[in-house]
Image: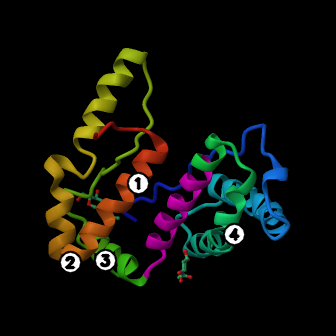
Amino acid sequence: MVIMIFLSYFLVGLVFGYDESKCTPAELPIAMKCNIKHRELRSQGATLDLEDDKNMRKLNETCEEFLECSTQFKCGGTEKDVENIDEAVSYCHVVAFHVSPGYLDCIDKVDTKNSTCVQGWNPFPDFEGTEEEKAVKQKEACRNFFGKDGCLEKEISDMCSVELWKDFKKHYLALNKIIEACDFD
Ligand SMILES: *[C@@H]1O[C@H](CO)[C@@H](O)[C@H](O)[C@H]1NC(C)=O
Ligand SMILES: *[C@@H]1O[C@H](CO)[C@@H](O)[C@H](O)[C@H]1NC(C)=O
């Protein structure tokens, strides 16, 4: 694998203050079950080896169940809870992208070509050093978020399609919002 998967992140759980009394009798049991799904999602995202397709599909299954109840789950949530639930929803959309046939087919081609653009591509690197050194490295990583001089755009558009590139970009920007690595606004 040249292209790595960057989905092993901790999603944030609910904060204190979830108020069940705000939920209707119809919402409540769904919300309670969804809380368990949310926890499962967070634990799987943090512990499964996501380079393994089997695990990725497993994560997507948990996501499917979570997405079905995520709207009701918000019923008793604080503003912060609702934000965290929305974050998990967009995380699940990124997961679904990573198991979609279009993505898998594309990444296979890009991986096989192993161009200099994708070698060492890492939008979310871990840094060591002082805070100052980390800040400099982070800035550099953000500049090359889509490969050196944004080379991934051409790479993916050429090898796959412009449509797939747009999806890729959309989902990695969503992931960046969750991880809060780069400030693109
Ligand atoms: C992944 O989950 C999505 C729902 O988020 C679903 O539409 C899609 O079919 C699932 N993909 C696979 C390969 O199971
Ligand atoms: C990609 O190419 C680099 C340099 O040519 C090589 O070191 C690396 O092993 C290759 N990776 C794969 C997965 O083929």
Q: Secondary structure at mark 3?
A: helix
Sequence-first tag of 3 and 2: 3
Magenta: main secondary structure: helix
What's the residue type where badge 4 is placed?
Answer: Cys
What's the residue type where badge 3 is placed?
Answer: Cys
What's the residue type where badge 1 is placed?
Answer: Ala
Q: CA distance from mark 3 to mark 2?
A: 9 Å
Q: Is residue 132 left or right of residue 17?
A: left
Q: Which mark is residue 106?
A: 3
Local packing at callout 1 (Cα closer than 10 Å; few below 14, some 14-19, many 20+) is: some
Counting from the top left corner in percent of width and height, residue 46 is at 64, 52
Residue, disc 2: 161
**C-beta proximity under 8 Å, tags 4 and 3:** no
Q: Reply above or below: 143 against 166.
A: above
- Nearest-to-viewer mark from 4 and 1: 4
Tell me, yes or no, if residue 116 can be seen here. no
Magenta-drawn segment: 84-100
Sequence-first tag of 1 and 2: 2
Q: Is residue 126 left or right of residue 40?
A: left
